[in-house]
Image: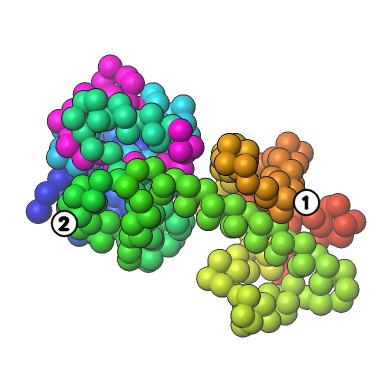
Amino acid sequence: MTETVGWIGVGRMGEAMVERLLAADIGVAVWNRTPAKCAPLVEKGARHAASPADAASERVVFSMVLDDTALKDLWSAADGVLEGNARIWIDCSTVSPEAAAEAAQAARDRGVTMISAPVSGNPGVVRAGNLIFAVSGPAEAIDEASPFFAAIGRGHHVVGDAQQAVVVKLCTNAFLAVVMQTLSEVAVLGEKSGVKRGALMEFINDSAVGSPFSTYKTPALVNLDFSPTFATEAQLKDLDLIHSLAVGAGAVMPAVAETEKQFRRLVDTGVGSGLDIAATLLLVARDSNLDIQPER
């Protein structure tokens, strides 16, 4: 084992990312608010840290938490991430630029260098080794952290020297939401016009507008399997952050604004609660008076 890093937050993504580190013979000290979630990783060789500060007893500590509030709780707590001995804190959470900047300043005040490193992918993408990072922060710290990024994913993109990475992640998720909404709309239009969803998606995926995203969402759109890889509630949270970012920047985003309304309806009506973002298809079908069924 070459080195041990700390890891705070082992949800679906965090668990898969820690597995990649362990497979690369990198030790990991893991902590999670719900301790039981650490058990599968401990069975694979991780150490169960007693607190965020304990996880941050290593030179480098990662975190992946739910939102702005969870991030602030992480660094402001008496046993928080800044109470350990870590010199580099890499945060992979999708949060607002303001929350990331506040955390980075708190870290600097304690002599810790913070790197913003949100990711693009889902647990399946992580386990396949195809995760990518958007990274921003001091160049020397990013260079020092590069071997860990390489162990987890297939690449990292340096996009700035402060918190620009969280902006890149939010912009990417805005695009993702609009694409998912549009795929759902055209799938319903096609079916109501006599075209099977599978046939439409096969053509789209083979065309210039096809993408890895449209390809791996095709089974959900065709078979109506909405097991969450990216839950509707998480996407709505990100769309709220995107809205605030756009207002603050004075950027007009009509397509994203309309998509945010549809995702809010998806969650508020319960149609997509706890489901993958591909469940946008169900709301569009309902609004279009289509009794949608899985295709065989």
State whether residue 18 appears in this view. Answer: yes
Give whichever of 149, 99 is nearer the camera: 99
Q: Earlier in the sequence, mark 1 or mark 2?
A: 2
- Residue 102, position in %: x, y? 38, 29
The magenta stretch spans residue 90 = yes
Q: Is residue 209 above or below residue 34?
A: below
For residue 93, side relative to residue 43 (left or right): right
Q: Nearer the viewer, residue 190 or 223?
A: 190
Q: Residues within 10 Å of mark 2 (few under 14, many from 20)?
A: some
Q: Residue at x 35, y 27 (%)?
A: 74
Q: Nearer the viewer, residue 136 or 274?
A: 136
The quadrant where residue 64 appears? top left
Residue on which the image places disc 1: 283
CA gap between label 1 and label 2 equals 45 Å
Left or right of 134 on screen, residue 245: right
Quick one: which residue is furthest to the left in this view? Answer: 2
User: Can you tell which quarter of the image residue 109 is in?
Assistant: top left
The residue that mark 2 highlights is 25
Could you tell me residue 211's position as x and y percent? 56, 72
Q: Which residues are magenta?
A: 74-98
| The image quarter in which residue 36 lies | top left
